[in-house]
Amino acid sequence: MNGADGGDLFTDVFWKGPKDASRVLVISSGTHGAEGFCGSAVQSQFVASGLTLPDDLAIMLVHAINPFGFSHLRRVNEENVDLNRNFIDFDTELPVNEAYRDLNHLLNPVEMTPEKLDASLAEIMRLQSTMDFLTFFKAVSGGQHEFPAGVQFGGLEPQWSRKTIERIWDVYLSKAEIVVQIDVHTGLGPSGVGVLMMAANPDEPHKAITADWFGTMMVSPRPARQEDNAFGGYMNAGMEQCLADTWVIPMTLEYGTEPPEVVLRAMIEDNWLCHHGEIDSERGRAIKERLMRVFYPDSKVWESQVLARAEEVFAQALAGLAELSVASKETT
């Protein structure tokens, strides 16, 4: 398996601070490969800032968690697996996303003329109007393990990129007492706006703590029922499970780019191209360019908004982590 240029693929780790620091800020990029350009930019800015760290605090940057998707301009990996749906327990029965089944033929067409794509998107939008938000989100984005050629496929086994990041966590973070994790993504929300997202129940201490650090965040409760597990498989949850003895505060920094229907259209096109089309063709190159721009817009205004928001969020995270101790978890 190689990159688009025929070269080797790498997931890179940057560390600054004491190797035995009890508190670590982790910033990761490229979980969804095509979204890695933004993540790489904010990580590069962070490294170049020349920041001074408090005692007993380190930063770790993980660049290109999905190097195949980053190189080949796909959100998914070489097995069409969405890595942010792959962090589940494969020794148990796989979760079933029944809501996705009714949409697979629209999201994963075998034939795709522009007219058919327009009709599929119109039907998807019609179906959206008949569902509540969570049902529709679960159907389209929640993850599924039944259709390997479909979108948001979570895989049938742990992927090598998952195993790689788990080894990185074990080597670098297993002795840390507190880890603040920020995974950078693009493609959801208003253009240029970076929203912090987190899974937490109301009684979990990191919900209140991060609200003090960052202000308003998008917080969703953890799935409480087996049938809700199709929302799972996220890498941040995988970090919590892997670092069971560490207080992990997991967040996603999600930047908006284009309207949802534009992003979804690009994802459907790219999925069709990689299974049924010809990548090295005029149409294939056009599809790849559209995919690139829904996750990394060619806009100086957008770039400046992204970098400014990252600078703010990372500074807030460092300031908060510098004052945080394990005892805070018990008193919040």
Image (cartoon, helix red, strand yellow):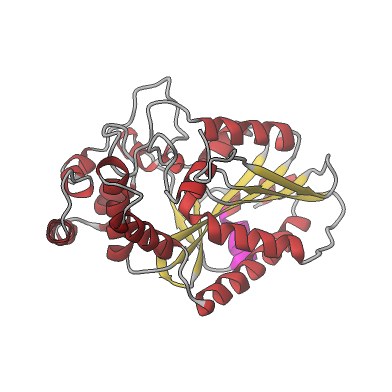
* Secondary structure, magenta segment, majority class: helix
At 42% across and 65% down in the image, what residue appears? 293
In this view, the residue farthest toward the top is 91
Q: Is residue 320 magenta?
A: no
In this view, the residue farthest toward the bottom is 301
Q: Nearer the viewer, residue 230 or 302?
A: 302
Q: Is residue 269 left or right of residue 237?
A: left
- Residue 70 in picture, x, y percent from top left: 51, 49
At 62% across and 41% down in the image, what residue appears? 11
Q: How many marks?
A: 0
Q: Is residue 133 left or right of residue 317?
A: left
In this view, the residue farthest toward the front is 281
The residues colored magenta run 207-214
- Residue 282 in picture, x, y percent from top left: 31, 58
- Residue 108 in picture, x, y percent from top left: 22, 45
Q: Nearer the viewer, residue 114 or 242?
A: 114
Residue 201 shows up from this direction: no
At 24% across and 42% down in the image, what residue appears? 276
Residue 315 shows up from this direction: yes
The relative height of residue 247 versus residue 52 in the rendered view (above or below) is: above
Q: Is residue 188 left or right of residue 128?
A: right
Quadrant of the image occupied by residue 19: top right
The relative height of residue 79 versus residue 277 in the rendered view (above or below) is: above
- Residue 157 in picture, x, y percent from top left: 43, 25
Quadrant of the image occupied by residue 110: top left
Q: Nearer the viewer, residue 274 or 34?
A: 274
Quadrant of the image occupied by residue 222: top left
Q: Is residue 208 magenta?
A: yes
